[in-house]
Image (cartoon, helix red, strand yellow):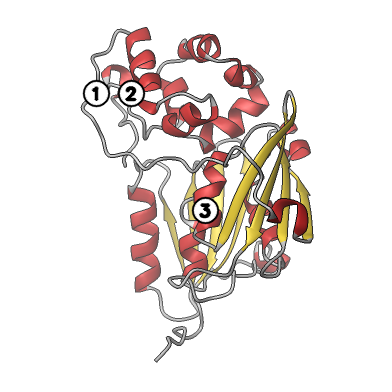
Amino acid sequence: MSGPTTTGASEPILASWKISDVLHHYPALLDTLVALDPAFGALRNPLRRRVQSRLVTVAQAAAIAGMEPTALVHALNAAVGLAEPAAEPQSAAPASPAAPPAWVDTATVAVEFDARPLLARGEEPFSAIMQAAGPVPEGQILRVYAPFDPIPLYDVFARRGFTGWARQIGPDDWEVSFLNEGRPAHAPHAAAAPPAASAWETPTAEVTIDVSELVPPEPMIKILQTLEELPPGGTLRVHHVRRPIHLYPRLDELGCRHETREPELGKVEVLIQKPAAAPETGA
């Protein structure tokens, strides 16, 4: 799904838009969101808004608030006097079952990760959570603590062979358990380790591209196309305006090493190293 274009001042809001895009084009909708559900109250905090709004789509925000995506889309468009958009295909956000599955209390918790301090500082926890998931053995749990139900993570972890379940333990506290059920058949390679810390100090990128001005999904398409053209072992440095969270699972599947840093607000650099040789496939 594509996001809003640069002419977004009169575009209808879609369920696939990031909340950050909604608030960029229509800042007054912050009050509308908070009025619709207290779950959106955290967006009044600039640091929390900076991180959370870039991770969550309108459809996922609706799931967090217990609303139908079409109802939230209608409410947001109506609040700014826009016509109802044409229907767009939606993939339902995975929801935790009402009762905890047996494994939540019986499986071993291999790693615990507290994302709350990072989010409180306005830092993006996605890469750190993915790194924490790396050493979790099959049949064991990664437990994440967050100030909200991190719905965008469920689909990402599902593609890595994890099943998630969340419970609220306080007004702004969630405990989310991800059980490693084994890597899915379409992702045969182990999660890629990040490059050595010195990779940033000693640039080795053979190609540098800037996708800052592109509209989703164009950045991901350009990055993958450029990677395909790189020779084995080549490196790619990407300049972006946000962390490409939907790209990371694809890079892992391709066996690419990758590291992301954010040198300043609104500027993100992703260093990607292509495998030295094509991964072997099963007979």
Which residue occupies 34% across, 47% down?
217
Q: Which mark is residue 256?
A: none
Q: Which residue is tagged 3?
A: 156
- Asked which quadrant contains residue 231, the reply is bottom left
- Asked which quadrant contains residue 227, the reply is bottom left
Q: Give coordinates of residue 65: x percent, y percent.
A: 53, 24
SS at mark 3?
A: helix
Position of the C terminus by quadrant = bottom left
What's the CA distance linking mark 3 and mark 2? 24 Å
Q: Give coordinates of residue 90: x percent, y percent.
A: 33, 39
Front-most of 65 and 119?
65
Q: Is residue 124 visible?
A: no
Name the residue at the left extreme.
86
Q: Image check: 13 left or right of 160?
A: left
Q: Does 50 sit above or below residue 114?
A: above
- The mark nearer the N terminus, 3 or 1, is 1
Q: Which residue is tagged 2?
A: 13
Which residue occupies 55% across, 36% down?
266
Proximity of marks 3 and 1: CB atoms separated by less than 8 Å: no
Q: Does 212 sit above or below residue 279?
A: above
Q: Which residue is tagged 1?
A: 85
* Amino acid type, label 1: Pro
Q: Is residue 160 visible?
A: yes
